[in-house]
Image (cartoon, rainbow, N blue to C red):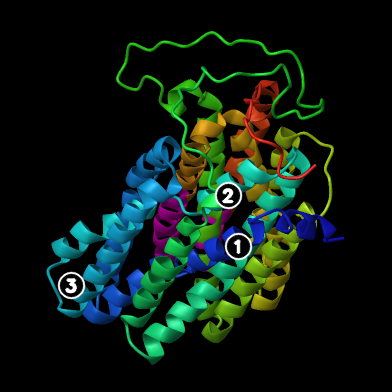
C-alpha cells in the first residue's frame, strides 16, 4: 500500500533533502510553546507570554512571504544561508534577553526575526515539485510531507514542556535553534535537488490548455499565450493581485488554523474542568495521530477526483468533526471524535498544497505556499485569542463553540468557492531538464 512512498523516496536526492528538511523543522513544533514557556517562567506573566507569541505570529505573517519571494527569485541556498543565520542569532539573543529579564519591548523587538527562515514547510515541497515525474507522485509527496510534519506537532509541544519544566526554561529554545542551525545548513548544502532560481511575473509563463484544478485531462496540449496583465498600482505583479484564487485558499487555511488552535485550548480547558489535566496531552496526541494516519493513507493511492472536490470533501469532513467536539462529555469520547476528525486534517493540507501548485507558476511556488502558511498562522493566532475569551467566559463549552464556528465557516467558504476553483487553469511550464525518472 505504501509502495508509492518508496518510489518517490528512491528519486535521486529525495531521501536526503526530505529527512534533513524534517530535522531542520523540529523547531516548528516547539517554537511557539518554547517561547511562551520561556517568557512565562522567567517573567511570571501569562499576559506577557501571550503578547510575545502574538507578535511572533504577526512577524511571521509579514516577513515569511517576503523571504519566500526572495527564495523564488534568487534560490534557496543564496537567500536562506543569510536568513537562517539571522533567525538563529535572534533565537539566541531572545534567550539571553529573557534570562536577563530585559524589558518586554526588547523581547518584542527580537522575536519577529525568527521569521527570516521563511515558510520552511514550503522548501521541501518546492523540491518535490522540481524532481517528481507526475502529478500523482506529487500528491504522494505532499501527503508524506504533511504526515511527517504531524509527527513534529505530536512530539514538539510535549518535548518543549518537559524540557522547560524539568531542566530549564531556556532549553527548548536552544534545542530549536540547534536543530535549525544543523539541519538547515545541511539541507541548503544539497544543491542537486534545489529548484533553479527564476525571475518571472504572474501571467508571463508559458501555459498549456490543460484544466487546472480539475485534473480530469492529461496536462498536455497546444501552448496558448496568456495576455500579460499590466498594473498601474504599487502591488503590480503581487501574487494576491494576479491570483485571486490564492486569497480564497489562504482564507480556507486560516479557518483550519483557527480550528486547530481552538480545539487544542478547549481540550486543555475540558481536562482542567474534569480534574484530568494529565490526560490533555495524550488526547491532543491522538488528534495528531489521526492526522498522521489519514495523511499516509491519502497519499498511498491515486485519486481521480479533482483537487477542488478533494479540498471540499476534506474541509467538510474536518468541519463536521469539529462541530461534534462539544458533544463529548468525557476525554475518552473527545479522543475518539478527534481521531476520526484528524483523519481529514493532513489530507486537506496536502490537497491545499496541490491547489497552490496549480494556481501559481513554478517560479513563484515558494511564495504562493508561504501565503497559505500566513493564513494558517493568522488563523491560529485569531482562534487562540477568541477561544481564550470564550473559555474565560463560558468554560470549555465556549471554546468548543469557537471550534465549531471555525469548522462551519470553512465549509461555507468551500461550498461558495468550489465552482470558482474548478474553473481555474493551471500553470504548466516548460522545464528545461530531463525528467527525474522515466
In the shown orientation, is residue 96 left or right of residue 318?
left
Circle 2 residue = 193
Marks 2/3: CA–CA distance = 38 Å
Task: Give the number of marks.
Answer: 3
Using the image, tell me which numbered label, if any, was put on residue 417: none
* Residue 16, image x, y percentages: 60, 62
* Residue 297, image x, y percentages: 79, 58
Span shown in magenta = 377-403
Up-down relation of residue 326 to residue 413 (above or below) = below
- Dominant SS in magenta: helix
Compare residues 232 and 335 and report the one nearer the observer: 232
Up-down relation of residue 50 to residue 330 (above or below) = above
Marks 1/2: CA–CA distance = 10 Å
* Residue 41, image x, y percentages: 28, 81
- Mark 1 falls on what kind of element? helix
The answer to whether mark 1 and mark 2 are in CB contact below 8 A is: yes
Does the segment drawn in magenta span residue 155?
A: no
Q: Say whether residue 4 is visible.
A: yes
Instruction: Pick whichever of labels 3 and 1 is earlier in the sequence.
Output: 1
* Residue drawn where x is 45% and y is 85% of the image: 162
- Residue sitting at the far bottom: 166
- Residue sitting at the far left: 103
Using the image, tell me which numbered label, if any, was put on residue 16: 1
Instruction: Pick whichever of labels 2 and 3 is earlier in the sequence.
Output: 3
Using the image, tell me which numbered label, if any, was put on residue 97: 3
Amino acid at each position: 500500500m505504501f509502495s508509492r512512498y518508496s518510489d518517490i523516496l528512491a528519486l535521486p536526492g529525495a531521501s536526503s533533502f526530505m529527512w534533513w528538511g524534517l530535522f531542520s523543522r523540529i523547531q516548528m513544533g516547539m517554537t511557539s510553546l518554547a517561547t511562551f514557556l520561556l517568557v512565562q517562567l522567567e517573567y511570571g506573566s501569562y499576559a506577557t507570554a501571550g503578547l510575545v507569541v502574538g507578535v511572533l505570529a504577526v512577524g511571521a505573517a509579514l516577513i515569511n512571504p517576503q523571504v519566500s519571494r526572495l527564495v523564488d527569485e534568487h534560490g534557496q541556498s543564496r537567500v536562506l544561508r543569510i536568513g537562517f543565520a539571522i533567525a538563529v542569532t535572534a533565537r539566541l539573543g531572545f534567550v539571553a534577553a529573557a534570562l536577563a529579564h530585559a524589558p518586554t519591548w526588547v523581547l518584542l523587538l527580537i522575536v519577529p526575526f525568527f521569521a527570516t527562515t521563511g515558510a520552511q514547510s514550503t522548501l521541501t515541497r518546492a523540491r518535490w515539485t522540481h524532481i517528481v515525474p507526475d502529478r500523482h507522485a506529487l500528491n504522494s509527496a505532499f501527503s508524506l510531507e504533511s504526515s511527517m510534519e504531524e509527527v513534529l506537532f505530536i512530539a514538539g509541544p510535549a518535548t518543549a514542556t518537559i524540557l522547560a519544566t524539568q531542566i530549564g526554561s531556556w532549553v527548548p529554545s536552544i534545542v530549536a535553534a540547534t536543530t535549525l542551525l544543523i539541519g538547515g545548513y545541511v539541507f541548503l548544502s544539497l544543491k542537486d535537488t534545489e529548484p533553479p532560481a527564476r525571475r518571472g511575473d504572474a501571467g508571463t509563463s508559458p501555459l498549456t490548455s490543460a484544466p487546472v484544478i480539475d485534473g480530469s485531462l492529461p496536462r498536455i496540449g497546444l501552448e496558448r499565450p496568456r495576455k500579460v496583465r499590466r498594473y498601474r498600482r504599487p502591488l503590480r505583479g503581487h501574487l494576491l493581485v494576479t491570483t485571486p484564487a490564492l486569497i480564497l485558499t489562504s482564507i480556507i487555511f486560516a479557518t483550519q488554523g483557527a480550528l486547530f488552535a481552538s480545539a487544542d485550548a478547549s481540550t486543555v480547558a475540558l481536562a482542567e474542568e474534569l480534574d484530568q489535566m494529565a490526560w490533555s496531552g495524550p488526547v491532543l496526541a491522538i488528534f495528531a495521530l489521526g492526522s498522521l494516519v489519514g495523511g499516509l493513507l491519502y497519499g498511498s493511492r491515486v485519486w481521480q477526483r479533482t483537487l477542488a472536490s478533494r479540498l471540499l470533501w476534506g474541509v467538510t469532513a474536518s468541519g463536521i468533526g469539529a462541530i461534534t467536539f462539544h458533544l463529548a462529555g468525557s476525554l475518552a469520547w473527545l479522543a475518539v471524535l478527534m481521531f476520526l476528525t484528524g483523519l481529514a486534517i493532513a489530507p486537506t493540507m496536502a490537497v491545499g498544497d496541490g491547489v497552490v501548485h496549480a494556481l501559481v507558476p513554478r517560479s513563484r511556488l515558494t511564495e504562493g505556499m508561504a501565503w497559505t502558511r500566513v493564513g494558517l498562522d493568522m488563523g491560529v493566532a485569531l482562534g487562540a485569542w477568541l477561544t481564550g475569551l470564550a473559555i474565560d467566559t463560558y468554560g470549555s463549552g465556549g471554546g468548543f463553540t469557537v471550534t465549531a464556528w471555525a469548522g462551519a465557516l470553512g465549509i461555507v467558504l468551500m461550498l461558495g468557492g468550489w465552482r470558482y476553483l474548478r474553473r481555474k487553469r493551471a500553470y504548466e511550464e516548460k522545464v528545461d531538464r530531463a525528467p527525474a525518472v522515466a
